[in-house]
Amino acid sequence: MTASPFIDLAVTSGGDAGSVLTSRFEPSTPQGFSLQQEYAVAGGIIANGTISFVFRRPNGQDVTCTYQGQSPTATPTTQEALLLGRVLRFQGCTDRQPASARRTGTNFRLTVNPAPNYPVTVKSPVTQAGGCTDEMEIITPVETARLRREFSWARAQKVAEVDSRGAATPLYYAWVYLRHRDDALALRRLSIHLLSRPLLDSELAPHAGKCGVFTNPGDGNGTFVPVLIPGATYNRLIDLQTTRDVTGDRTIFEAVVIRNLPSGLRNANGSLRLELLGRSGFRYLDYETTPLDRRGDIALESGSVARVLVDATAWLLTRIKDAVQLITTTIASVFAGPKVPVTLYLHAVTQDPAFVQPVAGIPPTPDPVMIRGWGPLANHPLAAAGMRVTILQRVGGLLPTALWSKTNNDGMAVVDMFAGETPRGSGLCLQLDTPRIIMTNFLVPADLCDFRGYDAARPTPGDFRLDEIGEAAARSSSAKATVHIDHEWLSALYQSDDAALWARDVIPYETPHRQRIVAGFWPTTIRWVRNEKVFPTTSCLSFLQLTGTGAQLVLNAATRGDGILTRAGLPPTHPAAAVASQVFLNTMLAADSLLPDGTAVRAERGLFSHEFGHFLFCSLLHDAQDGAVDYMARQAVGGTDLTTPLQYTNEGIADFISGQVAGSAAYNWPAEIWGFHPNSGTCYRKTASTASCFDANVTGAPGQVGGIGQPNVGRIATLLHDVYDGHGQRFALVPGDGDIWAEIVPRPTAQGAASLGVAATGFGNLNDPERVRLAGDTLKTFAAHFAERLALRSGDLRDADTYAALNAAMSSASQSWCDRCRVFALHSPSAADPPTVGNLFETCLADGLVRDALGGPPPEPSLRLNAATCTPCAPNETSNADGVCVFCPDTVVGNRCVKCPADVTFDGATLTEAEVNAGLVAPGDTCPDVFWAQVTNPGQLVTRGAHGLTVDLYPNILSVPAECQRPFTLRPAREFGSGLQFEPPLTASGTFNTEIFAGCGKPVVRYKMENASLSAPVLSVWFGTPTDSRTLMLLDAAIFPEPK
């Protein structure tokens, strides 16, 4: 399933009046192809505009083929006219050949002449070109609208409920109209078998030679899906309209249309011949795991309340259970024939330039497959477990055989195929859903099918050659095949599923419902294009109940200046605005993420890991607090302004997730960071070099990296990365370092090997001065605090809220003030480059955002901190640049070690007693906050007969209680040749006497330095106290004869 050469031949018009837009493709070799007679635009409305498709024949002659939109007017406003305006019909080619003729050409041009003011995206009309980009319609939008319009339950006729022998319950091929996920739920609860593609060979044969997805976007209100429905169930749906046993809403499905079958497939009563169905390998409800006796317990994936009344469903269940069981048993009893197993490995190709050609000058790698980059399966080909893989064989006349199995984590599926048969063709289909992700055109899972070998008489090059596999199976009773698939939808599903597994195993967390990715027409109609690049969108609207005020709030956001509808060219003033708004609500309710045509998902390894990151965070917010996710959803549809905190925070969180899962970022902030590929955002290490990648400390400073708003996306992404990296357990189920990939030299020679592979050793955890390494489960704590603050702000998020939530997550994991500070400060514009621990501590007090986020002061107000333990240094120590406590030989002032001058000096040769005011400050004092009294020649005090030196502190006003009862501190020190040696400080508060002699008892603090401490080698003694004019210091040398 390789890429089509026409994959990029598409044109998007914003509907500007008079605009004529052309896309060109010039392959190096001639390409074979056919044209479609009629096909739908990829998105938007062509109305009655035209396109011309030009190619050059091998003889050099140009051929022009023309198509026209089928709307009766250039300005359609009704639903019918708009639906017709989605269809292009072949008008003819200058070579006068029909559309289906096989052609060969080069120098292709696609030109679109749109209707004024109607945005449209058109792909080339090419089909059967050997690639895998075809779109095969299950039912057209026009036919959908017609069938829905013509159906009425009041006119519905009952069908047979038993066969002619009364032994089996008839089964009917039908269309069921679905509008909401609730309707899809009702299919399951009522045991109606949903088909993801057409059932009959006559329906599949027109797609022989094609490869691509079955599409069914519907009419804007709903879509018809093919089903097999028991006659008893259909009749009870009719009875439901008139029974007295049910009250309220009686309509479960708006329309169920019984379809006509070819004569060889139908019974006389119009039902399907069950024996033929059984021989084809079909088994009724074989995709279900819930037992039939518990159908009423099936819950809606989103957890919302279904609109169908429970009593109505219960009424039906009691009346159809036996019929469903009989059908299941009857079909299962049919022997389909001998089989042999085929082992398939289903891998997705990436076109990420980092994997195809990471370094200029190195030859590109052809079709490298995506590789998983985390956990125990790192370095295995990326795949998704639980995907249904079906092999189809045309061995009968009316029904192809269809046997299936499901993939494992390596993308392996062992599928049976019928033995002893020579099929007239074969096909391979993948149902694009897993237990975690569903890829859909609207409501039900999409099928990606390779029918290039479905007509064995004229296979298309590049087909899935089941005939060759069958020959090998016949010889060995088994066979193996590896299938490399290059398709946008599968790439997105694999990437999202990979991220969902990471969330399950590392956080650990499972989202409340599967991520629903809507692809194709509707997303392409409202797609977001910036600088000619198409972006996917994750709005998380599936978490909302879009009715009443909630719907209006979403529409208001979507239609404002940069809203998703206005951006798509459908503002409130557009003639079709009313229909567009209703269609938007109808389709967006089914979506978590939108995958329009033309995104870079094939060229960016982590793009949908990023989109799942949005969905994951929405899920965490939804679980944490009701209504919090509403703000994220409205922001997603309301604009793309990266200067708003909620926008860039949302994107930064998603880039953090894609960094963890795929080692890549979706935004442009890594543009100037060593290690990121400039064209894909994938981080990798070149040979013999380092790479900073996600360990770069983006600060959000204007102009730092990327474009407008990009630095803030990078700041949030790398801040989160710093909080969670550093576990040192490569590929364990813990947050990683984002250092997944490395250039492989010499490059592997095996087919499909990439230029990049999983690095043998890590390189992303640089020597940053931060030590936090939170466990994955704290992401829930972060989201809970984020949700709370988002709700309090009514969606007007500030950086302070994000930082406070992250601080709460770190605090919950017992991270110290010092460690939390270091993480935040690394991402402050005021941090030094390169930073030191000491500088980071200072930044945490100087940067108001960081200071407030930390939620409290540091353990020591002057930052004299031992960074390893986050405890204060000793009184005679300061904290150096590395956060290590070091001895200060002089005076500690704040966190500085300084040589303080004496504010007053006494000579030991003359001092007897002196009282001084501690408010004195020497001129040019470098320590103005400390009053120092110095006594020089202290040995002379001993020579003169002193019995030590006593120093007292007390207030200068003894009669005021407050002056007395405040704290007083005295810090003694002795000076040696090496500097000051401090003694422990003395601190005390005074006692105020209220008895006969009222007043403050003095001294408040008393310290006596003995003679031994005054003698040589002591050069001088010092006594310090905080500078305060209310404090008096008394120095008493006590020179008098010692009492006998």
Image (cartoon, rainbow, N blue to C red):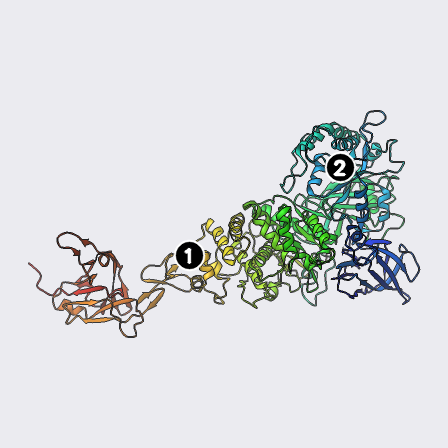
Give how far across and how far down residue 541 sits, in percent. Answer: 64, 49
- Residue 924 visible in the snapshot: yes
Task: Name the kind of residue labelled 1 in the image.
Answer: Ala
How packed mark 2 is, by other alpha carbons closer than 10 Å (few <14, some 14-19, many 20 or more), is many
| Residue that protrudes farthest toward the right in the picture | 96
Give how far across and how far down residue 172 sits, in percent. Answer: 81, 35
Instruction: Left or right? Give the position of 825 relative to 234.
Output: left
Q: Which residue is mark 1?
A: 868
Task: Name the kind of residue labelled 2 in the image.
Answer: His
Give how far across and how far down residue 628 sits, in percent. Answer: 56, 49
- On residue 261, which mark appears? none
> Measured along the vertical axis of the image, is residue 616 above or below residue 107?
above
Quadrant hosting residue 529:
bottom right
Does the residue at mark 2 contact the one at mark 1 (Cβ under 8 Å)? no
Q: Residue at x 31, y 71 (%)?
A: 926
Of 478 and 510, nearer the camera is 510
Quadrant hosting residue 22:
bottom right
Quarter containing the C terminus? bottom left
Q: In this rendering, which labeled residue sits more in front, label 2 or label 1?
A: 2
Q: Which residue is mark 2?
A: 193
What secondary structure is found at the residue carrying circle 2?
strand
Of 999 and 168, nearer the camera is 999
Of 661 and 323, nearer the camera is 323
Q: How many marks?
A: 2
Q: Residue at x 74, y 38 (%)?
A: 253
**Who comes first in sequence, dot 2 or dot 1?**
2
Instruction: Left or right? Give the position of 919 relative to 317.
Output: left
What secondary structure is found at the residue carrying circle 1?
loop
Instruction: Left or right? Give the position of 331 relative to 268.
Output: left
Q: CA distance from mark 2 to mark 1?
A: 64 Å
How packed mark 1 is, by other alpha carbons closer than 10 Å (few <14, some 14-19, many 20 or more), is some
